[in-house]
Amino acid sequence: MEVKSMNTTATMISLLFLIGVVASEDPYRFFEWHVAYGNISPLGVTQQGILINGKFPGPDIVSVTNDNLIINVFNHLDEPFLVSWSGIENMKNSYQDGVYGTTCPIPPGKNYTYALRVKDQIGSFYYFPSLGFHKAAGGFGAIRIYSRPKIPVPFPAPADDYTVLIGDWYNTNHKDLRTQLDNGGTLPLPDGILINGRGSDATVNVEPGKTYRLRISNVGLQNSLNFRIQNHMMTLVEVEGTHTVQTAFSSLDVHVGQSYSVLITADQPAKDYYIVVSSRFTSKILTTTGVLHYSNSAGPVSGPIPDGPNQLNWSLDQAGSIKTNLTASGPRPNPQGSYHYGMIKVTRTIRLANSVGNINGKQRYAVNSASFYPAETPLKLADYFKIDGVYRPGSIPDQPTYGAMFPVTSVMQTDYKAFVEIVFENWEDIIQSWHFDGYSFYVVGMELGKWSADSRKVYNLNDAVSRCTVQVYPKSWTAIYISLDNVGMWNLRSESWERQYLGQQFYMRVYTTSTSLRDEYLIPKNALLCGKASGFNVSEVRDNDQYWEIKNNIFQ
């Protein structure tokens, strides 16, 4: 439920002081979400799903650049719950990130109000439940951030704008899947693929001659997926907040955790056409179909379902063709190409190698041999309250160790405003997908084989796409450049949910000695406390003078 306005200015100010200052005069959008179990049957088998306001998938969040999103989440489940916001950078405010390293879970029967600001962002993203294996039961939905009215967009306004959430799916209850992993097992091949929560018959309605925007996000648990529409080309226009060079594709690989925007034109004879989603790089290809329905359709879908690509090199070539549109505006009126990332000196190189192994006889995954185990206290709260013994900065090496896997609450220490090269090295024979909370980064290189210093010769230092989730192909590497301009504790994780759950993640502590509110916001006054932080009180440091100083000087 979205509430358009509040009754009084006094009520607004009270809310701002409750959750901590959010922003200046940019619009506020208020949401009230009730998270509860409900019966769903996406693949024809009745199972317990996680619904938001009775919906599976959950409701779209529709916003505009710089909007303030106030989202009051009520947890009606029988276990703690958290929502995270994939691609929302939460500038200077990792307290709102909604992962266990930064935020205490919402207890059953309780609520928590998130205060987000989509500062200097546009594009297509999604939200999801971050604890345990809740994501396997639902609780996810789309996020749209439109450009402000005066900011030019590099394509005409479409006739309509559709959310397309795709993902692999299990008929097994999420608690049983979690227990399977806790007992040392692994997940089997999923039971199927969903399009907008349906195993078949998802429909996109179009009128002949008109152009439509599809915002496609892979919200699944494990698998890369290929998306295509029978007899229709798709023009790629945006990737996770970056306007791209407009390239036409007959099909598009969407790796787990990724989001794309494409334009399609209803320029074919009036009938219905297959929308097809199939798995990539799996031993058995899973496929589901939906329908592109013309308003004047003369008949149902017909003909063979169009085949998808089956070669790794096809996917690699497509990834290399996705580039930033340098002349287009992003969230601000200046061209996206005005930031010359390729001319900035790299101050640190971090190499990250994923691996699989066993700890105490159970399957685990690791980054640079460090297999992540969560602490009972969120790491960001341990920082704020100066609680010893929760984690140790530097507990994960920044280079591959080639050694035995070890258990640790892994945190990598980095410097605020450093410009860093990160190389993801995948020595395994399966595809990887990595996401970095709080950031977008430039994908400067992606090649088969092992990375070396000479690999930098093939880096794209001009128009690499900027995004927040990137794939690493089997026996391959991917390199990114990133400016660490967002102070906080940020999760860097595998988007394969089994691997993430069993240790293939860590937190990057982007640190400064400064205590200025220009660098990092204060802990929210409504912050939930848990673990070793339970006995503390959130500091009462905000007074009216400080509030107005923040309001007038920082958020402009």
Image (spheres, grey):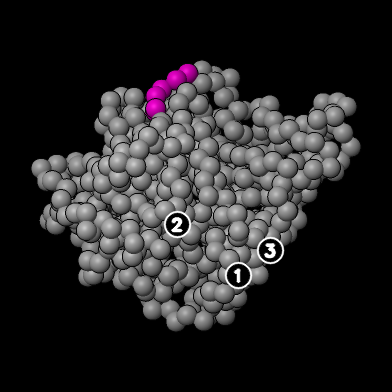
Residue 403 image position (x, y, % from top left): 32, 63
Residue 84 image position (x, y, % from top left): 40, 44
Nearest the camera: 338 or 474?
338
Q: What amino acid type is highlighted by mark number 1?
A: Pro
Q: Which residue is mark 1?
A: 335
Give the image quarter of residue 399: bottom left
Residue 22 image position (x, y, % from top left): 35, 51
Q: What amino acid type is highlighted by mark number 2?
A: Lys
Q: What amino acid type is highlighted by mark number 3?
A: Val
Is residue 16 something one can see in this rendering?
A: yes
Query: Few, some or many C-alpha atoms within 10 Å of disc 1 (few <14, some 14-19, many ≥20)?
Result: some
Name the dominant secondary structure of the magenta segment.
strand
Is residue 102 something one can see in this rendering?
A: no
Left of 181 or right of it: where is 304? right
Q: Residue furthest left?
A: 535
How many angstroms separate mark 2 from mark 1 (CA)? 17 Å
Q: Verify whether residue 35 appears in magenta.
A: yes
Q: Which residue is mark 3?
A: 245
Residue beneath the point at 70% across and 38% down:
276
Q: Which residue is mark 2?
A: 119
Q: Is residue 41 above or below residue 13?
A: above
- The residue segment tinted magenta is 34-39
Left of 336 or right of it: where is 533? left
Residue beneath the point at 24% across and 52% down:
523
Q: Verify whether residue 474 appears in magenta.
A: no
Mark 1 lies on a secondary structure that is: loop
How many angstroms separate mark 3 from mark 2 (CA)? 24 Å
Nearest the camera: 434 or 195?
195
Nearest the camera: 334 or 390?
334
Quadrant, the C terminus: bottom left
Residue beneath the point at 48% across and 59% down:
120
